[in-house]
Image (cartoon, rainbow, N blue to C red):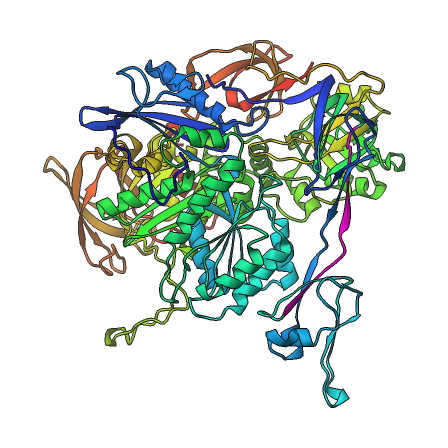
Amino acid sequence: MTVSVSTPPKIDRPINVIVATDCGSTTTKAILIEKIGDTYRQTYRGEAPTTVEAPFEDVTRGVLNAIAEIEELSGRKILDGDQIITPCRDDRTGVDIYISTSSAGGGLQMMVTGVVQNMTGESAQRAALGAGAIVIDVLAANDGRLPYEKIERIRSMRPDMILMSGGTDGGAVTHVVEMAEYVAAAEPRPRFGVTYKLPLIYAGNKEAQPQVKKILEDKSALVVTENIRPVLERENLAPARNKIHDLFLEHVMQQAPGYKKLIEMTGAPIMPTPAAVGLIMETIAKREHLNLIGVDIGGATTDVFSVFDGVFNRTVSANLGMSYSVSNVLAEAGLANIMRWVPFTIDEQTLRNRIKNKMIRPTTIPQTLDELQIEQAIAREALRLALIHHKSLATGLKGVQQERTISDVFEQQTSGKSLIDMLKLDLIVGSGGILSHAPRRIQSMLMMVDAYEPMGCTRLSVDSIFMMPHLGVLSTINEKAATDVFVRDCMVYLGTCVAPIGQGKDGAVCADYEIVWPDGKATKEQLKFGELRLYPLDAEQRASIKVQPAKGLNMGAGVGVAVTKEVHGGVVGLLLDGRGRPLKFPAEQQARVAALTKWFTAVDLYPNGS
Amino acid sequence: MAHSYTPGLTVTDHTVIHRRRMLPLPGNVLVKVGDTVRSDQVVARAELPGKVFPINLANQLSVAPGEIKEYLTKREGERVEKDEILAENKPLIKWFKTEIPSPVTGTIESVSLVTGQVLLREPPRVLDLLAYVDGVIVDTVPQQGVVVETTCSLVQGIFGIGGETSGEIVMAVKAPDEAVTPGHLTSAMKGKVVVGGSFLSADAMKQAKTVGVAGLVVGGIHDEDLRALLGYDLGVAITGTEQVGFTLILTEGFGTIPMAAKTFTLLSAHAGRQASISGATQIRAGVIRPEIIVPQAGAQAKGAARAQREGIRLGDPVRIIRDPMFGRIGEVSALPPELTKIPTESEVRVLEVTFSDGNRVVIPRTNIEVIEGT
């Protein structure tokens, strides 16, 4: 389908059967969604290796193989040779629409430019990330690099697209034009296709448009759109994001092997995978009025999404992942930070070699329990680092004058404060192999709790089989279908974590709590410091919990103030975390191993309580 | 149906391979289909545009950007030598004269009256693309490059660093489980491709650099030695541009791991022969593995390239690629179709491997790789 992303197609016919694929770097995943009664459900799934690379060099081969697997499992005839039968011919033949997302071939790689790094540079970065791109560099007039270094950098990178911003409308044009001159001098070449021109979006000061056009029109496929920062106090990211999606379809996808065919096969525009995941998260957060953090931890990259007070942000940590990038997690986190989560001792050399061996053989899986524990330790650090990265970019606008009232006299706040407030967080959604396929669901829950250190009461869930991308693109054409499947088949609610903020001595009282269970019975206990307690509470059930934090501790309402909340259950249940916030570990090795063993045994994390 | 199958590394005495040799930007192809080429022969050539040096004349002369043309001594497109005066002002008093010399030799690419910048470009650099392997040109892509076909022995490694090079194969050790020590590396190995056994120590790496070997092929190294060699911790396995003095290829992985007997025997058999090697590794979609290519002189480049495998079969030689038995080599003796619970509690597809001593183990299918090639 070749229509613009900014104007999704209107489909008049009823849509009852949908086949959707996500073409990942290594695997193409297909799902079948059928309307059963009044509700849409995900019924079958199939997967096959992605075929963007030699010897096939045609992405549609992998798509057809994945759909063929669904055909085998469901008994429905979907393919007629190399064609997908649309619309449905009868109950057993065809589908009403085929849709797809793609991150194959390394996803959408962009370079962005601005004038001031933490102002228009960051706005451009947010626009590109929100559109599902990996930002490979941010160039700005004040980025500390000399002019010739900037030009060399642009020359050496081979992005799929460049987004140029800079200046407010009506402001100075010199720096914007200067950057355009650098880009023109570098003659940037696209990653795919030797002969086509690199797509370049200009979304800066509108006064500079004529000069930018003059400099770059002949050297790139230039598209001019509205300024992403028309005034200092406001971002206007949507027009640039839409243009990124359009150019992704018109230029980048056209160069990737087999995508021309794929575009013709789909009934809605193909979206970059992270853009689709972001869309479904944003939709759900807004519908349920939630503040949420979503994470998709893959082999090469970790995407973090957040919606706080309706503001959506996405970041991608391009080199934090569990297979291809596993060694980079070690490099960034440091050995000590990984080892603090491992409940046994292992010498540094052995661990380093093991991690490198995973990097060079990324498809292997842990076979022994200690290998699983090491992988989950690495995952905690990858998740933690990706959230730190996200917090640094999901901020209010920097350099903006703040309106202050008399009540703010004693409160000093800098501009550009992170929007991520763990106390306001309602839900954490995890996705990606290590979280979705952990042998025990409690392992997924504890990995996220340890990495994110949620405060107060926070609900946690995982994506059952990684179908959020499919649902994201589906939501653009049929929101009910996307929501039905999301709620019933995609989300696996794990439960709720209750964690007081503050520190105390091991064994001292952390909080008094009273839980009133759905059957009316009550549990009244004390939570001690250094303790983890897990209570079963089914996914459909809710309980009421009253927490009276000990002296000096906080449950979000203030120090020592009691909090009563209704908490949701899940496949794991209700986790009371008395380990304090921020989480601290005994410095001595044996004591650390003992503490980890105690926690892991308390929640039955691994077989034999090890 | 998708196969649960990890493509293995090829170790074969006789195969026909094609290597695409492409310029990074359009240029000229210097050979034609049917030409016989040597590994060090230039097959295509391109001119890399020179580096660009921006100079903000408006700032340096303290004039408005729109006025800089009046001060330029050269015009757009003109050549300029290093230190030649590019622009100057003409004050009434000579003391106040400012002259702006050119920082490089090149041409004036553009003059901007908006920013006051002058862009100078150095002369283009010639980029020669070598054939890399001895063989025959079987295809040319105008302005872009060629495809070279060669009949050869091929050994794929699992990981490498450093670029393409060539040299005579020389064996440093006598057995695949013998580690390479500094004592094994002699001055006679200068410019050669040295094959070791199970391990290469940091000291041996230093000695290899001193001797000036072209390449090293070993079973394994320690990650911390790699970090010391590179000067940084390698985060992702995308390599090929490192400059450490030699090209390094690991055939098995990280740690002390004996080189697979098949690999060691094959390389031993070709000792004294010329090999083309590359350490370039890319472990992402579109995998690139390091390789050792020994062209077979006089052999006819006939026959199709290797066919794609369909899956794992009973009797396939396999290498276990994950702890606790990392590096062990055996044969597939059973392929149970059902999912099996492993100690982590994951339910996965497994296979049974029998070792040469008759012992059998059950391993997840994703944790082995087939040793390919005949």
Residue A332 appears anywhere in the view = yes
Identity of the residue furthest to the left in this view: A520
Residue B174 coordinates in the image, percent (x, y) = 80, 23
The reply, left or right, for residue A319 in relation to residue B271 is: left
Give the residue displayed 32% in from the left and 49% down from the top: A454
Q: Is residue B304 left or right of residue A564?
A: right
Residue A510 position, x and y percent, is: 27, 52
Where, by quadrant of the figure, is residue B193 drawn?
Answer: top right
**Part of the protein shown in magenta:** B117-133
Taking the spot 57% from the left edge, 12% from the top edge, the residue there is B332
Q: Is residue A357 above or below residue A160?
A: above
Residue B306 drawn in magenta: no
The answer to which image quadrant residue B73 occupies is bottom right
Asked whether residue A382 appears in the rendered view, the answer is no
In the image: residue B33, left or right of residue A64: right
Quarter of the figure that contains the C terminus of chain B: top right
Residue A221 in the image, given as x and y percentages of width and height: 53, 49
Between residues A136 and A417, which one lies in front from this camera angle?
A136
User: Which residue is at 62% across, 54% downward?
Assistant: A153
Residue B123 forms part of the magenta stretch: yes
Judge left or right: residue A591 versus residue B193. Answer: left
